Amino acid sequence: MHMKSHIQKSIIQLALLFLVTSCIVLTDNLSSENKEYLLDEFDSLTYIQNELDTFKVKVTTSFYDPYVSNGYIGIPQPNDGLGRSTFYFPDSIYKLTISIAGDNDGFNLFFNLLDRNSVYFYSSLCWHSFVIDKVDLNETVMIQKLEYHNCISYNATESADSNRIGIHSFIYNRDYGLLQLNIKNGEKYELIDAE
C-alpha cells in the first residue's frame, strides 16, 4: 500500500510540475532594433519596370503583440511579437512581405509570384521564402546611379532551389527594403524613390 501511495504522489507531483512550467511561457516583444528592419516609415515606394515604366506601390505595416497558443498535445507555444511590411507590384501580381519577430537575429522575405493568368512561376508553391541573417547585410551596391550600403544579394543560380522558384535574383537593403528584383520571365524592377 505504501508503494502505491508513493507512486500516486510522484505522479501528482509530476503533473503539478508540468502544469506550473507550462504556465511559465516566455514571449518577447518586437524589439525597437528589429522594428527598424520594417518599412513603416514609408507610405509608398516607386519602382521602374524594365527601365521603361514607373509605378508607385503602397506600403502597409502591421504589428502584432506576443501571445501563447496551444501547441502540440496542449503544450503552450510561445509566439513573439511580430512586425510585417507588405506591398504589391502592379496589378497585385507580385507581393512582397517582410516579417521579423521578437529580438531575432534574422528576418523573412516572402514573395508571391504570379503571372498575369494567376499561375505561379515555376512552382506549385504559392510563395517563396528567404531567411536573411542581419549580419549578412554587408554589401554595397549601385542601383539607378545611387549607392546603397547594408545590402544582401541573392542569385538563384547559386541556390539548390533554383529550378523551383521564379526569382532569378534580388537585392535587399536594410533601410529601403527591396532595391532590385529580377524574375525568370525577364521582368526587372528597381527602386527609384521612397516616400
Image (tube, grey):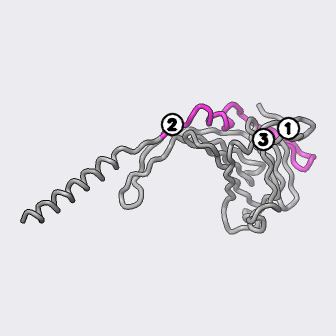
Indicate which disc, 2 or 1, sits on the residue closer to the N terminus.
2
Q: Residue at x 68, y 68 (%)?
A: 124
Relative to the observer, which residue lies in front, 11 or 30?
Answer: 11
Q: Which mark is residue 29?
A: 2
Task: Inspect the magenta stretch and tell me whether residue 29 lies in it.
Answer: yes
Q: Which residue is mark 1?
A: 192
Q: How packed is label 3: few (under 14 Cα within 10 Å), some, or many (20 or more)?
A: some
Q: Position of residue 140 (x, y in %)?
A: 84, 39
Residue at the image point whose x is 77% and y is 44% from the top? 172
The location of residue 27, given as percent across then percent down, is: 46, 42
10 Å neighbourhood of mark 1: few (<14), some, or many (≥20)?
Answer: some
- Nearer mark to the viewer, of 2 and 1: 2
State which tag comes first along the sequence, 2 or 3: 2
- Could you tell me the amino acid type at mark 2? Asn
Provide the residue span drawn in magenta. Answer: 28-54
Judged left or right of residue 49, residue 110 is: left
Mark 2 to mark 3 CA distance (whole Å): 26 Å
Q: Can you tell which of label 2 and label 3 is closer to the viewer? A: 3
Characterize the local packing of mark 2: few (<14), some (14-19) or many (20 or more) Cα atoms within 10 angstroms. Answer: some
Q: Secondary structure at mark 3?
A: loop
Residue labelled with disc 3:
138
Residue 175 lies in what quarter of the image? top right
Name the residue at 11% across, 61% down: 5
Q: Circle 1 — which element?
A: strand
Q: Quadrant of residue 35?
A: top right
Q: Secondary structure at mark 2?
A: loop
